[in-house]
Image (spheres, rainbow, N blue to C red):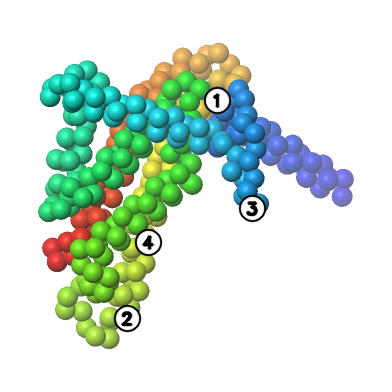
């Protein structure tokens, strides 16, 4: 009896130590009510819902402010000169890329109607991703609530685009491939309806997982120095952490591109069901 009790206590101590070794990583990844880790804003509760401004909300607002400032400056430059310079020229290059390499090829005719949304979601995700790489910054797109909301908006745009082009009845009728046997129609309809919801689900999970994974790897590599309690592992840990950090810059760009590309592709599939 004493041996079993001792074993239980030992297992508890080991699990507690493991939690202490890895818990700090989760602490840095999850959202918190500490803005920049320095101060907290007053808590706001409305109808039992916690509406307190958190760290991720703060950085989403910061991303929105930076976008408004950048595009306002771009518009002012166009009023004074037809040839933008400096940062405005950089923004124009990305705008042209999203228009010519994402929206036009995947949506086709009528892509102009959806271009404002695609540009907004691309720059918003890109800005949030980059803010997470700044010291003391936080990646709002590593929050599943944020990515799920973005995916839900894309879902609404996809369905609205398809219904406006084909009509409500025509849109749902077009979900079923031509030539399907009559007895298979109920099954195919259920499968296609489920497919409508798996698309935004994949968008949300992909962005969330990729933006979270990179930060976890970097923190884990740095944490090896303290877990192993030796300075000799520091050069290797820091070198690999810097490499992953540079790779995260590329991932930030790729994830903004992939989310926008897939959203645009799904819009094109909904609008042009006959292709």
Q: Please tell me whether mark 2 or mark 1 is closer to you in this view.
A: 1
Q: Do the CB atoms of the residues marked 4 and 1 lie less than 8 Å apart?
A: no
Look at 76% across and 39% down and name the residue there. Answer: 10
Does residue 256 sit above or below 79 in this rendering?
Answer: below
Q: CA distance from mark 2 to mark 1?
A: 53 Å
Residue ID for mark 1:
36
**Label pair 4/3, CB-CB below 8 angstroms:** no
The residue indicated by pointer 4 is 197
User: For the residue labelled by badge 1, is the local secondary structure a helix, a strand or a loop?
Assistant: loop
Residue position for label 3: 47
Left or right of residue 265: residue 39: right
Q: In the rendered image, which quarter is residue 17 located in?
A: top right
Of the residues tagged 3 and 1, which is closer to the observer? 3
Q: As drawn, which residue projects farthest toward the front?
A: 79
- Ranked by sequence position, the earlier of labels 3 and 1 is 1
59 is higher (above) or lower (below) than 117: above
Alpha carbon distance from label 3 to label 2: 42 Å
Q: Which mark is first along the chain, 3 or 4? A: 3
Residue at left offset 50%, top offset 32%: 58
């Amino acid at each position: 009896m004493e041996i079993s009790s001792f074993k239980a206590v030992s297992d508890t101590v080991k699990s507690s130590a493991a939690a202490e070794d890895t818990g700090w990583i989760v602490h840095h990844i999850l959202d918190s009510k500490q803005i920049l880790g320095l101060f907290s804003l007053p808590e706001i509760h409305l109808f039992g819902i916690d509406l307190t401004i958190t760290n991720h909300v703060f950085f989403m607002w910061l991303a929105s402010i930076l976008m408004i400032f950048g595009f306002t400056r771009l518009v002012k430059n166009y009023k004074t000169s037809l040839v933008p310079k400096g940062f405005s020229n950089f923004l124009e290059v990305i705008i042209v890329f999203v228009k010519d390499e994402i929206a036009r090829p995947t949506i086709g005719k009528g892509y102009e109607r959806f271009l404002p949304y695609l540009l907004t979601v691309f720059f918003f995700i890109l800005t949030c991703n980059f803010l997470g790489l700044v010291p003391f910054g936080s990646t709002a797109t590593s929050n599943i609530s944020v990515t799920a909301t973005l995916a839900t908006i894309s879902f609404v745009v996809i369905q609205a685009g398809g219904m406006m082009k084909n009509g409500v009845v025509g849109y749902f009728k077009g979900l079923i491939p031509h030539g399907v046997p009559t007895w298979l129609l109920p099954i195919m309809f259920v499968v296609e309806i489920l497919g409508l919801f798996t698309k935004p689900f994949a968008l949300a999970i992909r962005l969330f997982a990729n933006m979270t994974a990179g930060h976890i790897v970097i923190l884990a590599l740095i944490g090896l120095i303290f877990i192993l309690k030796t300075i000799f592992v520091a050069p290797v840990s820091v070198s690999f952490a810097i490499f992953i950090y540079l790779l995260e810059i590329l991932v930030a760009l790729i994830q903004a591109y992939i989310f926008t590309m897939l959203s645009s592709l799904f819009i094109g599939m909904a609008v042009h069901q006959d292709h």
